[in-house]
Image: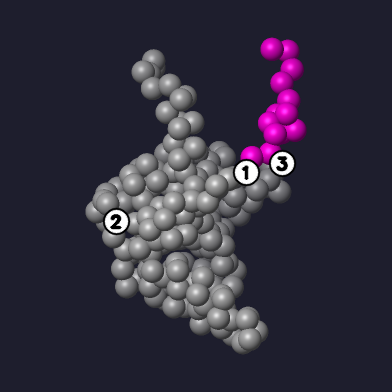
Amino acid sequence: MASNISADLLIQLAKNRRSIYALDKDIPISTARITEIINDITLHTPSSFNSQTNRIVVLFGAEHEKLWDITIEVLRAKVPSDSFAVTEQKLNGFRAAAGTVLFFQDQTVIDNFAAKFTPYAAKFPHWATQSAAIQQYITWTALEAEGLGANLQHYDPLINEKVQEAWKLPSNWTLDAQLVFGGKVAEAREKVYQPLEERVKVFGA
């Protein structure tokens, strides 16, 4: 089907998506709108063999704060006490945001597809990670497009067990990433780009 939307729109959205760390709870859209966006993205994120291995948990308000309280306590037991203040300050920065999207992979689905398509068995975990990354990127970009800021964190597997216990999640859901989002207090830092000549090669054009 022909579309009036050009690739320029997608590229502009990609340019706008940046890591924003200074976040607060003053968000420009409703939690219902955020949930709607995440639901649509979950439906339309591609996956190998249409395996649909991604699983999502969205935390707002006190539930979001509970996640970062858990993370602070887990890290307190692992980071040397004389350097924990820096870690705690960073984690409290995430806690000050409005919410977190937790991205999981369903290990049972991955294992079932690996058993069903044995020639590709070793590839299914890799393909699931690719699908997860696509969903994380689309979600991040979509929230940015709605005026929010966000940053992607990876405190798994340190917090996995506590997260599953706190929200009574299936044991076959494996935590992959945490997207922290909120109102923008400050913009992203300037980004330095490596020369394209070192990164892209074109033949036959």
Mark 1 highlights which residue?
192
Q: Quadrant location of residue 57?
A: bottom left
Residue drawn at x 38%, y 47% is: 143
Quarter that holds the C terminus = top right
Residue 189, image x, y percentages:
52, 51
Q: Nearer the viewer, mark 1 or mark 3?
A: 1
**Which of the numbered marks, if any, corresponds to residue 119?**
3
Question: Which secondary structure type mostly characterizes the magenta part of the structure?
Answer: loop
Residue 75, compared with residue 58, is above or below; it is: below
Q: Quadrant of the N terminus?
A: top left
The disc at residue 27 is: 2
Specify few, some or many for label 3: CA neighbours under 10 Å numbering under 14, 14-19, or 20 or more: few
Mark 1 and mark 2 residues within 8 Å of each other at the beta carbon: no
The tag earlier along the polypeptide, 2 or 3, is: 2
Q: Which residues are magenta?
A: 193-205
Residue 138 seen by the camera: no
Q: Toward the viewer: 2 or 14?
A: 14
Which residue is located at x 45 percent, y 67 percent?
Answer: 94
